Each structure stands twice: as C-alpha cells, then as structure tokens.
Image (spheres, helix red, strand yellow):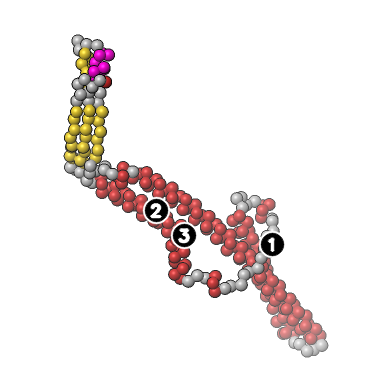
Amino acid sequence: PDLTSNATIGITQNLLSGFGRRANARFIRIAQNDQQFSRSVFRQKVIDTTSKVISTYYDLLADVENIHVAKEALGYAQKLLEDNQEEKKIGAAAQLDVAQAELDVANRQQDLLTAQNTFEQDSQTMKSLISRSFSGQIAAVAIHPTDHLPDPHVSDIPSLAEALKEGGANRPEIEQSMVNLKNQEITIHATRNALLPTLTAFAAFSPQGQEGALGAALGQVFHNRYPGYGYGVSLQIP
C-alpha cells in the first residue's frame, strides 16, 4: 500500500475588516494609554498633597500671627482695665467703664483661645499630611513654624493668559481627559473597522508525497517532489 503525506504553509490577510494597526493593536494602544493615565493620576495625587502641605503651612504661619495679635490685644485690654480700676478708686471713672473694660478683656481672651485652637487644629492637619500613620505619639509633637508670612508682590499672581497657558500644560486632569479621548477615538475606529465587509486574501504552499514507505513519502515532501499551490480571496458581507 502507498502512504500519502503532505505539509501546508499558508498565509491570510484581511483587507477590509481587521486590516491595519488600528484594528489589531486596539487593546495594546489602550493599555499604553492607561499606563499614561495611571502616571498622571499619581502625579495629580503628589501635586494635591504637596499643595495641601504648603497651604496648611501658610495657615500655620497666619495662625502664629493671629496669636501674636490676639496676645497684644489682650495686653492692651488688661492695661485699660487696670487703668479704669485705678481711676474708679479715685472717682475718675464710673463702674460702667470698669465693666466695659472687663467685657473687653473677656472678649480678647476668647479671641486668643480661638486663635490657639485654630493653630492646634492646623498643626494636627499638617501632621496627618506628612505622616504615613497618625498615632498618639505624633499627635503630641509640637510644631513651631520658623518662617514668617511673605510680603505680597504683584508678580506673585500671573496674568489670566499665563495662568491658562500654564494650567493647560501642567494640570493632570487635562492630560487625563486627553487620554480618555484618545481611548474613545481608538474604540470608535476599531468599531467602524469591524462593521466593514470581511475581505480576505489567502495563499498556501502544500508539497505532497506518496510512497510505499513513510520515510520515502516524507522525503518527497521535504524535497518538494510534488508541489501544490493555492491562492485566492474570500468576501463575506454582514
């Protein structure tokens, strides 16, 4: 009996639906964009955290100034109360003046307590921002700002055009929106491509062999004794 053997090498190529990088690299391109999106989200978190730390630190500087002002105001109120009490003793001030001065001292004490409480709250906020974990030991640490509020300058505030330009170039939210638009564009192109008819070109090379022994039949295949060729196109319209 004769033994038949063959080997086939073929290629196919989509010419309409499934043709091109847009159709075949869709998920790779989206994954690459998602990596850029993740980096942008991380950068946004760093910017937000840094901005909160800087803003909270300036709040602490303002709190220190408020405490200083409240202490000075309390000192003036106490001095006025002492003067009114002395004048009352000699009849130069009425009891109403003393009562008003006492009320003013109480108000200034309340202002001082409010300023001190605000400083403590902002201190705890700062600790929570710069610490990975907030414990009782960290909560007990005192913060003493060593800087002073800077004097404002006109150049500190950019013009509207400069602010819009800088924001458009550096804001992560804009970058993330652009990445989402790119992914949507990739998906739209892939969907449109999938709606096209399926036109496929194909070609095949198929050497064959036929002998009474298996080795001889395989030898005819590898030596291309009886080559076979095929090619064509197929069209499917959805």
Please provide percent x and percent y for residue 73: 70, 76
Residue 178 sits in quarter: bottom left
57 vs 7, left or right, is right
Please provide percent x and percent y for residue 64: 66, 68
Q: CA distance from mark 2 to mark 3?
A: 14 Å
Residue 104 showing in the rendered view: yes
Span highlighted in magenta in the image: 214-221
Instruction: For marks 1 and 3, give the one nearer the viewer.
Output: 3
The residue lying at 52 percent from left, 58 percent from top is 48
- Identify whether 198 is placed above or below 217: below
Q: CA distance from mark 2 to mark 1?
A: 43 Å
Find residue 179 and name its label: 2
Instruction: For marks 2 and 3, give the one nearer the viewer.
Output: 3
| Quadrant of the frame with the N terminus | top left
Q: Tell me whether circle 2 and circle 3 mark residues in contact (CB < 8 Å).
A: no
Q: How many other residues sit within 10 Å of disc 3, few (<14), some (14-19) or many (≥20)? A: few
The residue lying at 44 percent from left, 58 percent from top is 173
Asked if the stretch drawn in magenta spans residue 91, the answer is no
Q: Tell me whether circle 1 and circle 3 mark residues in contact (CB < 8 Å).
A: no
Please provide percent x and percent y for residue 174: 42, 59
Disc 2 marks which amino acid? Val
The residue lying at 70 percent from left, 82 percent from top is 100
Q: Earlier in the sequence, mark 2 or mark 3?
A: 3
